Amino acid sequence: MRYQHAVVTGGAGFVGSHLCAELLDRGTAVTCVDDLSTADPRNVTHLEGRPGFTMVEADVREPFDVTPQADLVLHFASPASPADYLRLPVHTLETGSLGTRNALALARRHGARFVLASTSEVYGDPREHPQPETYWGHVNPVGPRSVYDEAKRFGEALTMAEAQANGTDAGIVRLFNTYGSRMRGHDGRAVPTFIRQALAGEPLTVAGDGRQTRSLTYVDDTVRGVLAMAGAAGLRGPVNIGNPDEITMVDLARTVIRLAGSRSTVRYIERPEDDPTVRCPDIALARERLGWEPRVRAAEGLARTIAWFREQEADAAAPARADTAGRDGVPKAA
Ligand code: NAD
């Protein structure tokens, strides 16, 4: 299904900026609504000036509107990295609650399809593995991570209530850890942290004994999954979007060192409170209802991401250098 005008809240962030670019590529006009609280504004500079792209700097915790009429609302505004949501705890809870209410109200007024970006964090430190959408989760409601996990759980409940009570065509995707270009090197998430450290020749800091697992999805796959959900009118979900290839943190660190051709070593540091032990999506539902599954293997996605980080370093060192990046600011895949 092709949409005419999409609103992407959080569109200047990591995932949101890739969504904006892909929507524009597919011929959909895009209004990005973002308060730039956790964004690197350069994420969307390559989009400004593209026909159909509008940037609105606004905080979705306040009611907002757009013109012209929108037929799709992708609600992606929210601090997402632990470093950000621990720094912005109340902002995070309010964005997940008030922000979701305001984004849903916009979708209702415009008669638009709505997709909430939820997260695998709703499963907490899971007791069921892999995690199907039917698993209710194991979340500490007052722990440090609760500001994010509970904001998303509330956002899911609100999205379901809005669909049931007001008939808004709303759906939920539960995204698992996504990585790729435009992540911030200091945002505290494992992939950009390891890449930054490997490129600097510093030790890669692995939490605990490094045997905890994550499932990493390359951003192009995540974007394809989100837009498949957007196109599945009437489907509420939630639907897991993630790569079931599970990897331990220490294996991830070693893979990054190898792919970066780095001499870095691994250093073990204290594990954060409530850090999940395992994380792996059951994607049977995404396969069945969306015809979606990930395509990019970790070695390929990590190599592309490392190339992008190298490019950023080179650009920072030589600002006047000619731009060799692809049209959307991402280096072309080899
Ligand atoms: P990000 O921090 O790069 O992007 C979030 C964007 O939301 C930023 O541009 C930020 O400025 C904006 N924002 C935050 N609060 C806002 C507010 N009140 N009003 C307007 N804009 C606001 O994070 P990301 O990794 O791109 O995540 C995007 C979405 O996807 C989030 O909702 C996140 O919970 C979800 N998600 C991401 C991942 C992942 O691995 N990246 C996994 C699961 C879910």
Image (spheres, helix red, strand yellow):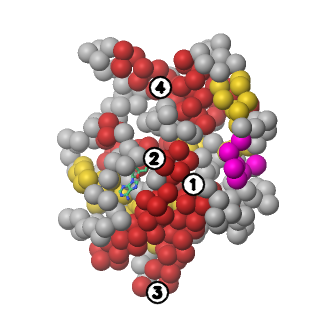
Q: Main secondary structure of the magenta part?
A: loop
Say left or right for 186 vs 101. right
In the rendered image, which quarter is residue 127 located in? bottom right
- Chain part drawn in magenta: 271-277
Q: Nearer the viewer, residue 320 or 235?
A: 320
Which numbered marker is on residue 255?
none
Q: Earlier in the sequence, mark 2 or mark 3?
A: 2
Q: Nearer the viewer, residue 317 or 267?
A: 267
Q: CA distance from mark 1 to mark 4?
A: 23 Å
What amino acid does circle 4 point to?
Phe
Q: Earlier in the sequence, mark 3 or mark 1?
A: 3
Q: Residue at x 46, y 80 (%)?
A: 162
Which numbered marker is on residue 309?
4
Q: x, y (%) of residue 52?
A: 22, 51
Label 3–label 1 contact, CB within 8 A: no
Q: x, y (%) of residue 160?
A: 52, 77
Q: Is residue 16 magenta?
A: no
Element marked by disc 1: strand
Q: Nearer the viewer, residue 136 or 242?
A: 136
What amino acid does circle 2 point to?
Val
- The residue carrying pointer 1 sits among few (fewer than 14), some (14 to 19) or many (20 or more) residues within 10 Å by Cα, namely many
Which numbered marker is on residue 175?
1
Which numbered marker is on residue 165?
3
Q: CA distance from mark 2 to mark 4?
A: 16 Å
Q: Is residue 308 above or below residue 261?
A: below
What amino acid does circle 1 point to?
Leu
Which numbered marker is on residue 15?
2
Q: CA distance from mark 3 to mark 1?
A: 25 Å
Query: Can you tell me whether the CB of the residue at mark 1 lies under 8 Å from the nearest atom of ligand 1?
Result: yes
Say left or right for 88 vs 67. right
